[in-house]
Image (cartoon, grey):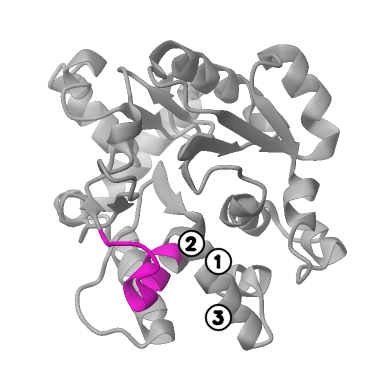
Amino acid sequence: MSAISIFCKSYRNDLERAIKLVESIRRFNVDSLPLYISVPSSDLGIFRERIGTDITWLADEEIIGANPDIDLNKYMALAGQHSQQIVKAEFWRVNPAENYVCVDSDMRFIRDFYRTDFLSSDGQPYTILHEGKSFLEFCLSNRLNEPIENFEQTARTMQQYFKRSGPLYNFGPFPVIWSAKVWRTLADALHSEGSNILDAIVSHPHEASWYGETLLKYRPVELLPKEPVFRAYLFLEEYERDQRARITEQELAQLYLGVVYQSNWYPKRLQPLKRLAYKIKRRLKNYL
């Protein structure tokens, strides 16, 4: 049994991106870490047909059903923003491995990766944990105040819930490395309060923060902080800046295992007029 697996929660609208993700995993997965992909049961057929059967397919409903504290009908009524976070947080219940790397469909590996990129020599999982200063600096330099406010508000809210003082931590971006021991600890704590992960994420939809703050409070695994393992382009301006600097994926591979291109702005997918309108809007904001 592998000590760690790779897990992706996807759905029909992300099929093409999921195909590229899987292709990159097949190419660079040197240690053959097992790959699991979960989609709504109604999407399983098309995913299997387009991607293949050399990976393990799961239905979202199967993962949710593994938690007796969650009402499946209540889950099915949730918006996608919440439901996909719950599936990611609950995969540990059906995962044969004790740890998993949680990836998204819009990600792609760009170089060989190994078990040791995610686990220490004695099998302890690393944890993505940092103060996000490069992200905050980028927002400041581009007058993007809303992301800064959102980060600080989210971090403080989670701090208050766990009664922790100190630095405001960022536990992402994805991919993240998660241990079943941490999720199990959180599940037990929530259960003792008459709650569950569905209620938790609906109230505070930040699954990575739930994981990170639980680890900091209870320490069910050793804390081994690690910087993000992917270069995540969260804003169009970030991507354009690196394009102007002619930074290639081959160069990024010296520092990162992969890249994340946000699908809602990635230039090749934007209609010309939409892209022009976006640029005008951004420039106008700089003068307000």
Q: Is residue 171 above or below residue 41?
A: below
Q: Is residue 136 visible?
A: yes
Earlier in the chain: of badge 1 and badge 3, it is 1
Residue at (33%, 40%) from the top-left corner? 118
Q: CA distance from mark 3 to mark 2?
A: 12 Å
- Residue 105 lies left or right of residue 262; in this view the side is right
Q: Which mark is residue 189?
A: 3
Q: Which residue is mark 2?
A: 181
What range is drawn magenta here? 211-223
- Residue 130 lies left or right of residue 160; in this view the side is left
Q: Which residue is mark 1?
A: 184
Residue 179 is situated, as x and y percent measured from the top left of the image, at 45, 54
Specify the amino acid type for callout 3: Ala
Q: How many marks?
A: 3
User: Mark 2 touching mark 1, by CB under 8 A?
Assistant: yes
Q: Nearer the viewer, residue 93 or 39?
A: 93
Residue 19 is situated, as x and y percent measured from the top left of the image, at 58, 18
Specify the amino acid type for callout 1: Arg
Quadrant where the C terminus is found in the figure: bottom left
Mark 2 neighbour class, 10 Å CA radius: few under 14, some 14 to 19, many 20 or more: some
Residue at (35%, 71%) from the top-left corner? 219
Q: CA distance from mark 1 to mark 3?
A: 9 Å
